Image: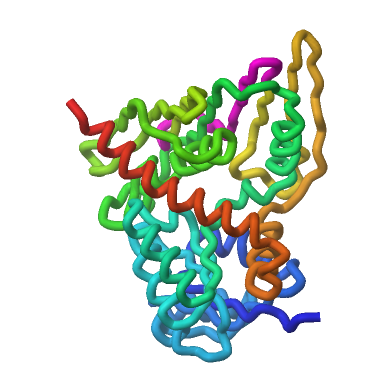
């Protein structure tokens, strides 16, 4: 059996504390080796709870020969910078979404990872949940016929004052925070080659970031995707696929709670079926995938290549969304 993958935490973000590190402690094949924060007290607190050596700088973690990979949990605008530094230091990288705010950065990072034989994975947990596997199975079986349209939304209520999502210098805004989820779902459900037919971004003069928006995408097949996102809305985490023969919809799809049993609502013709799926912690699932990709890459190579290509295309679409939203 391979030795556990020694993972270092670079940045003590909220999602790491609440979900990722508790899941890591339950995931065989992984070990938290180090915790780095600009705040020594926060690093020490995380290390006391989850293990690993507390470090007071990111540079110290990247220089540690005992750390094979990093989980990067920093504000959005720091993702690409520190992912690049980690790859240059010879570390495999699991990075919180979005990996990059634009296509050029994403292409450069995946090229660098490939040149160095390192795993670079963007942390979209929902793609590793059993829900997505079942949806993929139904689409492959032709259950819905030809896919004609996708609708998807991820919206959340307003954040507390001082939240980094409201800070433009840190990559705040709804598009980069929750808009990337339905955008990624559209890529997965319609395949590559999507183009932006139109986009709207609602901006907050007070905060200087976008607080909501909508995008219309088109696929080479002629299928469309309508996506919505925002952080001044009633909560919604959903997508629907409409085909020539049927429709499939699922709620709570992007941030599925570990104990939640998803229900796929499938209608084919006039017959409706509720497909109940078992509960699953998708944080554990993505961590298992990452560890396998590092230790036994050939086992997950097709999936890893698909995820990388989707990440590159997604980053390019972010450029196109901003350009379309600014057009007169």
Residue 166 x/y as whole percent: 32, 47
Residue at (30, 52) in percent of width and height: 167
Is residue 21 one of those drawn in magenta? no
99 is higher (above) or lower (below) than 242: below
Is residue 237 one of those drawn in magenta? yes
Q: Farthest left residue?
A: 328
Q: Quadrant of the C terminus?
A: top left
Of 270 and 280, nearer the camera is 270
Residue 23 x/y as whole percent: 68, 63
Residue 263 in sight: no
Residue at (48, 68) in percent of width and height: 72
- The picture quadrant where one finds residue 247 is top right
Residue 118 x/y as whole percent: 53, 73
Residue range in magenta is 230-247
199 vs 129, left or right, is: left
Of 11 and 145, nearer the camera is 145
Residue 208 x/y as whole percent: 23, 43
Residue at (73, 27) in percent of width and height: 142
304 is higher (above) or lower (below) than 40: above
147 is higher (above) or lower (below) than 111: above
Look at the magenta stretch and give its main secondary structure: strand
269 vs 319, left or right, is: right
Residue 234 in sight: yes
């Amino acid at each position: 059996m391979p030795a556990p993958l020694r993972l270092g935490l670079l940045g003590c973000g909220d999602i790491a504390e609440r979900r990722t590190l508790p899941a890591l402690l339950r995931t065989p094949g992984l070990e938290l080796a180090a915790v780095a924060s600009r705040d020594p007290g926060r690093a020490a607190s995380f290390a006391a709870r989850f293990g690993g050596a507390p470090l007071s700088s990111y540079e110290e973690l990247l220089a540690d020969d005992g750390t094979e990979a990093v989980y990067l949990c920093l504000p959005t605008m720091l993702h690409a910078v520190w992912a690049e530094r980690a790859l240059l230091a010879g570390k495999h990288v699991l990075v919180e979404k979005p990996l990059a705010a634009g296509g050029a950065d994403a292409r450069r990072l995946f090229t660098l990872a490939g040149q160095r034989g390192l795993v670079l994975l963007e942390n979209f947990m929902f793609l590793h949940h059993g829900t997505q596997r079942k949806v993929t199975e139904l689409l492959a079986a032709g259950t819905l016929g030809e896919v004609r349209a996708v609708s998807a939304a991820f919206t959340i209520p307003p954040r507390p004052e001082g939240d980094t999502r409201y800070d433009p210098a840190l990559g705040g805004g709804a598009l980069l925070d929750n808009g990337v989820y339905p955008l990624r779902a559209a890529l997965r459900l319609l395949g590559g080659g999507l183009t932006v037919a139109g986009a709207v971004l609602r901006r907050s003069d007070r905060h200087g970031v976008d607080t909501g928006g909508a995008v219309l995408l088109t696929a080479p097949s002629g299928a469309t995707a309508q996506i919505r996102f925002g952080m001044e809305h009633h909560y919604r985490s959903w997508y629907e696929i409409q085909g020539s023969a049927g429709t499939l919809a699922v709620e709570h799809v992007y941030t599925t709670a570990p104990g939640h049993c998803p229900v796929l609502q499938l209608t084919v013709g006039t017959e409706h079926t509720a497909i109940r799926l078992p509960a699953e912690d998708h944080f554990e699932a993505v961590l298992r995938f990452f560890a396998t990709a590092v230790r036994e890459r050939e086992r997950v190579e097709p999936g890893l290549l698909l995820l990388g290509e989707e990440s590159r295309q997604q980053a390019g679409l972010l450029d196109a969304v901003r350009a379309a939203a600014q057009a007169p």
